[in-house]
Amino acid sequence: MQIRKDLILKYNQPGPRYTSYPPANYFHTDISAQDYKNALSRSNDEDPQNISLYVHIPFCPRLCHFCGCNTSGSKNVDVIRNYVDAVKTEINNVAELLDHKRKVSQIHWGGGTPNSIPMELVKEIMDVLKDRFNFDTNPEIAMECSPAYLELEHIDQLAEMGFNRLSLGIQDFNNEVLEIVNRDPSKFPVEELVARMKQNGFKGVNLDLIYGLPGQTIENFKESIEKVIEISPDRLVTFSYAHVPWVKKAQTVLEKVGIPDAEEKLALLEMAYGLLTENGYLPIGMDHYAKPEDELFKALVTKKLHRNFQGYCTRETTGQVYGFGSSSIAQLDNGYYQNTKSIGGYIENINKTGWAVERGYQVNKNEKIIRTVINEVMCNLFVDFDEVGIMFDMDASDIKKIVDYNPEKLVPFLDDDLMEINGEQIKINTDGSFIVRNIAMAFDPQLTVMENQYSKTI
């Protein structure tokens, strides 16, 4: 299909990514360690009952100019050692407050570059997780990896620890583009890495690309997409580069090179979308693609797709999220609790008090309802207000009042054939999926967009 460029450019405005609701910029510092401990205890009586664990490893051997994550270029072995010890302490402290009968269905390692620390330290953390938590029969255990620092034997070692899904942060196969953004290329051919994963029985192979980087052209990015198709991963993510120099000053370096404008980015997106869908990949949400047999696509078909700070996932796999490490966020039914971003501050706080929560947000019932509606929009491109009402033991009309449902706000989307309304149901069409952030904003009664607050939706 042809992407309707005029409409996408029309709706290209700043807006939240809605990886949480309310978004992370609503988090505040009036949150104490005791608040977090109380929230952990309450979470035992809240849904979902299954547990997702997130481990944040902030260390990167080389800092990419485009990155918006919480990272550190420290290579100090003592700092890394002390950090891992602090993470293990935090795991023990959190586990003490959780019901051991609850099962872990998902573990996600992010960063930073988790695979850049010694594998024996990864194993130390995994051993503590296995000791302190009750794992489900076949939990998804995933790690975000930079292929620049991934040895073939690392894949063997990760498999022995129980990992069964790896996301390779390729970003671009063009070495000139990687040099511009200060990123090292893969040490081994990516085909060899993927083959080794399959030899080890990994159930999932993900590749990550970014479009909108300096130096990218239709021609060279097409080569990257064709390379992905040749490698044939189970899933692919094509992240839109988010230029937020007011948050990440390192990104200003890229302005000197020249960043693709909205029309150029859209051309990259259109090319990638066309090639991937022509070659058997199906679009998931804003930026994911999956093969028809993949769990993500099956979840989309059955309207059981979910989304959190780690990306798209299935409701069956994803539980309440408990985070460990600097800047990690616990995503509980009752709220969000984020650790300090400073590595030194994290280690010091854990060593002194056992806790490092710095900010967060406690969610009320109305915000849970808004969160549910926005999640349905962002993930499943479909909302049934009757079903949401059943979830919260309320009428659909009451749900609509809480999300400030206003048909006038939806008229532009309806006029542009981006969505349709049928009774209490809203369905977003394929064209609408490209501006789903904009549609979600229509159901956010708390939304205010100030300058330099959010990245643009394209």
Image (cartoon, rainbow, N blue to C red):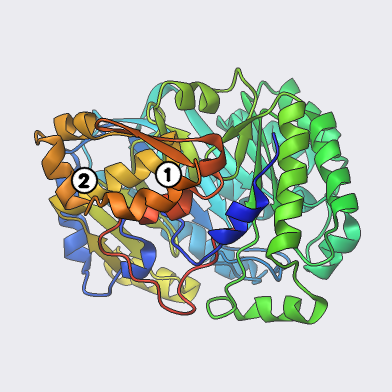
* Residue name at image x 27 percent, y 68 percent: 353
Q: Secondary structure at mark 1?
A: helix
Location of residue 364 with respect to 361 vertically, above or below: above
Q: Position of residue 303 (x, y in %)?
A: 40, 26
Q: Position of residue 277 (x, y in %)?
A: 71, 30
Residue type at mark 1?
A: Leu
How busy is the neighbourhood of tag 1: few (under 14 within 10 Å), some, or many (20 plus)? Answer: some
Q: Quadrant of the C terminus?
A: bottom right
Q: Is residue 334 visible?
A: no
| Quarter where residue 143 is shown | top right
How busy is the neighbourhood of tag 2: few (under 14 within 10 Å), some, or many (20 plus)? Answer: many
Residue type at mark 2?
A: Ile
Q: In the rendered image, which residue does mark 2 sit on?
A: 369
In the displayed structure image, the side of residue 378 where residue 149 appears, left or right: right
Q: Is residue 223 visible?
A: yes
Residue closest to the eye, 52 or 271: 271
Q: In the rendered image, which residue does mark 1 sit on?
A: 414
Q: Position of residue 399 (x, y in %)?
A: 16, 43
Between marks 2 and 1 in the image, the one whose residue lies nearer the viewer = 1
Q: Quadrant of the N terminus?
A: top right
In the displayed structure image, the side of residue 101 where residue 235 appears, left or right: right
In the displayed structure image, the side of residue 385 where residue 249 appears, left or right: right
Q: Are marks 2 and 1 in contact (CB under 8 Å)?
A: no
Q: Secondary structure at mark 2?
A: helix
Q: Which mark is residue 47?
A: none
Q: Between disc 2 and disc 1, whose residue precedes?
A: 2
Q: Position of residue 286 (x, y in %)?
A: 55, 45
